[in-house]
Image: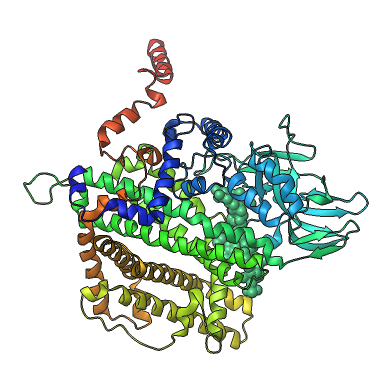
Amino acid sequence: LEKERGQVNFNVEELTNIYDGGAEETKLRRKVADVIQNDPEVRCKDIGMMTREERYIDGVRRCVYLYKVLLPREGWTPVSKEVKDYFKYRNIGKERSFGVHAGVFIPCLLSFGSDEQIAKWLPLAMQFQIIGTYAQTEMGHGTFLRGLQTTATYDKKNKEFVINCPEISAMKWWPGDLGKSANHALLMAQLVIDGKKYGMHPFMVQIRDLTTHMPLPGITVGDIGNKVGFETTDNGFLHLNQVRIPRENLLCKNAEVKPNGTYLTKASDKMVYGSMVRLRAIILESEAVSALGKACTIAVRYSLVRCQGELEPGKPEVSVMEYMTQQKKLLPYVAMTYVTHFACLKLSNQYNAFTREMDNNDISGLPELHALSAGMKAVVSEQCSDGIEILRKSCGGHGYSNASGIPIIWSSAVACCTYEGENTVMLLQCARYLVKCINQVQTTRMVGSVAYLNNMTQSTCHVDSVSGFKQLDVLVACFQYRAREVLKTAALKLSHLTKHGMASYNAWNQSSVELVNVVKAHITQFIVTTFASGITELECTKPVKNVLQQLCALYALSCINASTGDFLKVGYLSPRQCDLAHEAELELLSCIRPNAVGLVDAFDFSDDLLQSCLGAYDGNVYERLFAWAKKSPLNKTEVTIYQQYIQIRLIGRRKAF
Ligand SMILES: CCC/C=C/C(=O)SCCNC(=O)CCNC(=O)[C@H](O)C(C)(C)COP(=O)([O-])OP(=O)([O-])OC[C@H]1O[C@@H](n2cnc3c(N)ncnc32)[C@H](O)[C@@H]1OP(=O)([O-])[O-]
Ligand SMILES: Cc1cc2nc3c(=O)[nH]c(=O)nc-3n(C[C@H](O)[C@H](O)[C@H](O)COP(=O)(O)OP(=O)(O)OC[C@H]3O[C@@H](n4cnc5c(N)ncnc54)[C@H](O)[C@@H]3O)c2cc1C
């Protein structure tokens, strides 16, 4: 790898600073990383050989130490900028507990609670005097929130809410930290007053005794069992049987119930969905893009040291990175990490701007933000998790071992396709907004992420050279045109179906397969446009700008070459231009290849965070692999009890004969 590092033609530290948002940000992040990673009590453990129970207990132990000892010792809190920045890009693996407590329960308390309620519960939550979960999903409903069955019925006489799960499908199922850790739940239930339903509302419900940690009366709670990933997290189940809570436990920033049962709403009923917009807008970096960056780091470093086969007959074996097919597997995902990182940054900045507008009672930006966050969450989580699996496979047999570190990265990242809104449902939410926009574009000027819809002029691509397809303005035009045209086509189908008498909900269902593709085109356009314009404005050295332009072009071309049918169907590219785009991607792979190790080094993931025998900074793969394997529990004894048992059985049988 040192030889590879010698040929990198740009300043890696400069790129790390750009990725972090500035040299100061890098310094801050590294400071937190050093403190956390050099403290034996909290540094990531080699979890590849641990049982589920060991991982849960180790995760809780490490996080209690992190939050109760290390952070106070350093003068930080869970929401300090240092810690937030560190967790944003480099969360301490998936091996942390209380992720929902810190990342969902506390922010939702701030979103839904009145000032008095925040003053009451926030200090307790920040000090871990109470551990909370966000209990919304039920065994029978996760997507369709209007179908949630848990009820909160107001009892005027006692000024209480009676929380009840009327049947087994109403049981809360999946909430993180619920199974064994949480003693409180921010619980979403259908509010009922005098037999009338008012929809989903947030309630603070204590579920365990604060001294004994035993479930309170009427509460049945536990862990839902082993999962594909998130093994440190005790995703749990919660059944409530006529559990009574005080009237004051309805989190009442947006709506309240007076003592006499009068219902008072203070904000749009969609604000109750606000917590999900927030999470969709901010989780992508830490849960998906950062995971892709780790997998890229491992796969690129391994591919550079893994020698396999002769490229030129009779010559020494080459690193598998010399094969074009390996470059095609890896480098577009290195590009995707950079490109989506900056698009996610733009989305989270847009969310922060919305929260400031909301403080001034202006929620006019919510529809666009809901659509963009839903679309981005679906597209980025799917592209990243699909990419991580391709990167795992690119490491051959050792990629299938937990020693590679990639399986656990994938098993966490892929969950992002489901939680916070199942991806297809999120794509269709974004599609709902896009169809509205295209139907209004003749009379209303579009702004923000849909501004490209204003330019309705027909045109085709005039590029007739391979180098022309490496120009960012050409690529941006390709994506904007494709996104606009596939949306127009889907909207035309919808209106055609309804004009010929089909009910709107049926027409929507009949068009939903196309609409999913429309949103993917829209979001890919947003990602490419954002990065391309960001590079233009970026102040950096020429070699860094050059490599970022190559990455943007590579991501764009890999997306075009994966969906040439769209560009041919809308008449924007000819078959010959598709061939030129394909050649342009191959040329870019070769241009970027010499910088591959520098591009992943710039992500600045420590060996401690990667937890990988294949992706360590020094590239000493085989020594690490063998040391790791020797730690297998099966190697504790040369002859395992089972082998002894078999011998006894076999010997016993032989004697019998
Ligand atoms: C670390 C892991 C932690 C994980 C935690 C979790 O998973 S927690 C669990 C995560 N669980 C989930 O994420 C559950 C996913 N499910 C949902 O979010 C909802 O059930 C739904 C949006 C799918 C449908 O909801 P519905 O049937 O009530 O609504 P509808 O479709 O009929 O649209 C009506 C109008 O509302 C609008 N609008 C909708 N949502 C939002 C919003 N967030 N903001 C703003 N606006 C929104 C929509 O655009 C439409 O506007 P229009 O066009 O009329 O102007
Ligand atoms: C790791 C993990 C952590 C989680 N943490 C939490 C948590 O802390 N708190 C919490 O409350 N929940 C949590 N969840 C639950 C999660 O939010 C839900 O699983 C998610 O919202 C999906 O809902 P569902 O399971 O009902 O899927 P479903 O909606 O049942 O999806 C099944 C299929 O139906 C399709 N489908 C459903 N509705 C439609 C539609 N209208 N149109 C087209 N297709 C449709 C979907 O696309 C999907 O293919 C977690 C889940 C996971 C995996």
Specify whether residue 307 is in view: no
Q: Which quarter of the rendering shows the C terminus?
A: top left
Query: Can you give x and y, in whole percent of width and height, for residue 12 in the image?
Result: 28, 52
Q: Is residue 541 left or right of residue 195?
A: left
Residue lying at the far left of the rendered structure: 314
Q: Is residue 252 visible to us here? A: yes
How many numbered markers are drawn?
Answer: 0
Residue 45 locus on image (x, y percent)? 44, 33
- The answer to whether residue 621 is above or below residue 339 is above
**Above or below 654: residue 518:** below
Identify whether 343 is placed above or below 315. Answer: below
Q: Quadrant of ligand 1?
A: bottom right
Instruction: Give the quarter of the figure containing the N terminus.
Output: top left
Furthest residue toward right: 157
Q: Residue furthest top?
A: 655
Q: Which residue: 67% across, 49% down?
A: 135
- Quadrant in the rendering for residue 335: bottom left
Q: Position of residue 576 (x, y in %)?
A: 23, 79
Query: In front: 69, or 279?
Result: 69
Residue 281 place in picture, x, y as percent: 53, 60
Residue nearest the observer in this picture, 592 or 359: 359
Question: Coloring scheme of the render?
Answer: rainbow
Q: Residue at x 58, y 76 (%)?
A: 508
